[in-house]
Amino acid sequence: MTGPGDRSGADASRGASSSGGGFRKGAFGVSGSGDTSGFGGLVRVEPGGAVALHSTDRPYGGWFDEVTDALIDAVGAATYAAAVQRVLVDRGEITYFVAREHLLTLVQALRDDDALRFELCSSVSGVDYLDSGGPAASAGRPRLHVVYHLTSMTFRRRIRLEVAVTVEDPHVPSVSSVYPTADWHERETHDMFGIVFDGHPALTRILMPDDWDGFPQRKDYPLGGVPVEYHDATIPPPDTRRSYR
Amino acid sequence: MTATGYDPYAGSRQTTEGRVYTVTGGDWDQTLGVDHSGEERLVVNMGPQHPSTHGVLRLVLDLEGETVTKARVVIGYLHTGIEKNVEYRNWTQGTTFVTRMDYLAPLYNEAAYCMAVEKLLGIEVPQRAQTIRVLVMEINRIASHLVGLATGGMELGALTGMTNGFRERELCLDLLEEITGLRMNHAYIRPGGVAQDLPAGVEESIREWLAVMPERLAGYHKLLTGQPIWQRRLKDVGYLDVTGCLALGVTGPVLRAAGLPWDLRKVDPYLGYETYDFEVPTADTSDAWGRFLVRMAEMTESLKIVEQALDRLEPGPVMVEDRKIAWPAQLSLGADGMGQSLDHVRHIMGTSMEALIHHFKLVTEGFRVPAGQVYVPVESPRGELGYHVVSDGGTRPFRVHVRDPSFVNLQATAAMSEGGMIADVIAAIASIDPVMGGVDR
């Protein structure tokens, strides 16, 4: 496929991130391009990579505090403290990082409590944070995230819940008993990321064929090259092409 | 089946080519243990290639006589991995992928994606670009509703509705072609604004279209609304009330036909929709008939918005000033089609080395987007179209997930059609108006 020289750059950068690097080399993120401008020597430290590791301090501002207080009232302070690991306010959106054991308690309260009323589950999807910069994925920093977007039609508010699990133990309770619309969303997330939603009525593949092997949206899913009809020629997979690194 | 004993349904014999099995079938009764004392149950597999299923949609229907006892929906026949593909292209190139999802509402995909990227970047697009976005999106809404009407009509046997719907849709597509260069899959809305300004003379074209359309829409009322057959095919068919809609996550015309005036243009305005004067049409019938009426009324409302957008167009830039993002913004139409404007090429090739480097870096690598995640919903012709976009700070999207309204609304098929007649399944699905490109992505 690709020559040994082409691979070395990729291996070097993977090695850097797996040793807990959390930095990015070069002004434009490209390595091995023969850039002599000096910008290639820049090293920028990015503490969390794509996952912000910090928590926003209260007050969160706007109606975020109102919702958080109502949620604490609804589930109790002890449960809230155990359930919500971090809260992040970014770009006018609030994200609750939730422990999976308490997910169902939270969504039930979020849907049914009079002060919360998140009637609509807009979307459930997954994100695989492998190689996203920052410390490498570990048991303490799981790479698979399930993201729930809930909408309150009464108060016209949107919040995001995020549950992180490891690849080795990808179990999350299904919210389809609370939000029936999550049925297909969870099937898709299972199909693409291999997350197992416990309690889902029929967790099967939905977009990929039933006998498909692997979970395509995971970041380590092999992309494959395209065979071409010329002698000794192949098109390398997109992630190993020079310009896409 | 045992390997050794004689099997009457899958006998085998030795040949020179090896062992050959002859499967004769007919053993379902033994295998499934169906008793004949009950009523006759028939499983019909409809689609994925069927002219009445609104695309490559497969329905597995359990029938008792003509009554549907169970409806299961199988999707995925049009899955092309767009969400995955976007992760290997830069932010600007992402537009050309997302526009191919819901191919009847391409401009909504582009707009929602670009608004998500802009929210991550923390930039605001110029006023003129916002107005142009509203303008093209509303023309697109009319085109999309017309196709929903046309294909729905065709599936129910109203073929004149089909020919008329596609005729008027062609007028909309002509406008979009004049503005963007393409009939579908425009890639016209880009992060930071739109690809290029409105061409000269398009205002007259839109005003002519605005003059023609009300009369054409009235024609649909003449052709369909008062027609007894059309009414009987739609009334009390595909019933789903507000509670059912919310439980199943159904939004758009289906929800509004159940009586809830939930329209993101009103309740969560974007692109200055709060400044336009328009109504949110609703119905209280919760059936396919109400959805038809809501879509008809929405087209009239969209015409009002297009006219207002046209009136308030002020000269100005259509792309952000920031040169580190604004690409491509120097396009023009040459003798051989659209490309970089000659002035821009002269500038970067002849006078400024800096500009050349900048152009090269921007085109080959693209711009960086600060790390984080956003969710941006817009009201597409089919409901809430939401883009969940995650950036890791790189030149490519880290993850783009699309909450496509067709995907979510299609879950309501069973609730709408179980217990009804098989012919009404067609009407129910047509009233959801799913686009399989968006469902399967």
Image (cartoon, coloured by chain):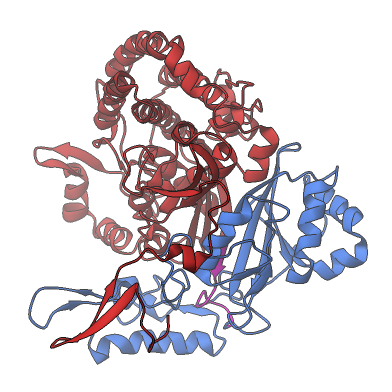
Horizontal relation, residue B359 to residue B294: left or right: left
Q: How many marks?
A: 0
Give the percent coordinates (x, y) of residue B287: 57, 27
| Residue in the picture at 40% in, 30% down | B148
Q: Is residue B217 visible?
A: yes
* Region of the chain picked out in magenta, as a range: A126-135
| Residue in the picture at 34% in, 55% down | B93
| Residue in the picture at 24% in, 60% down | B353
Q: Quadrant of residue A172?
A: bottom right
Magenta segment includes A232: no
Front one among B250 and B63: B63
Give the percent coordinates (x, y) of residue B327: 33, 50
Horizontal relation, residue B180 to residue A183: left or right: left
Secondary structure predominantly adopted by residues drawn in magenta: loop
Give the percent coordinates (x, y) of residue B7: 36, 78
Which hue is chain A drawn in?
blue
Front one among B422 and B148: B422
The quadrant of the rendering that contains the N terminus of chain B is: bottom left
Q: Is residue B403 above or below residue B431?
A: below
Which hue is chain B drawn in?
red
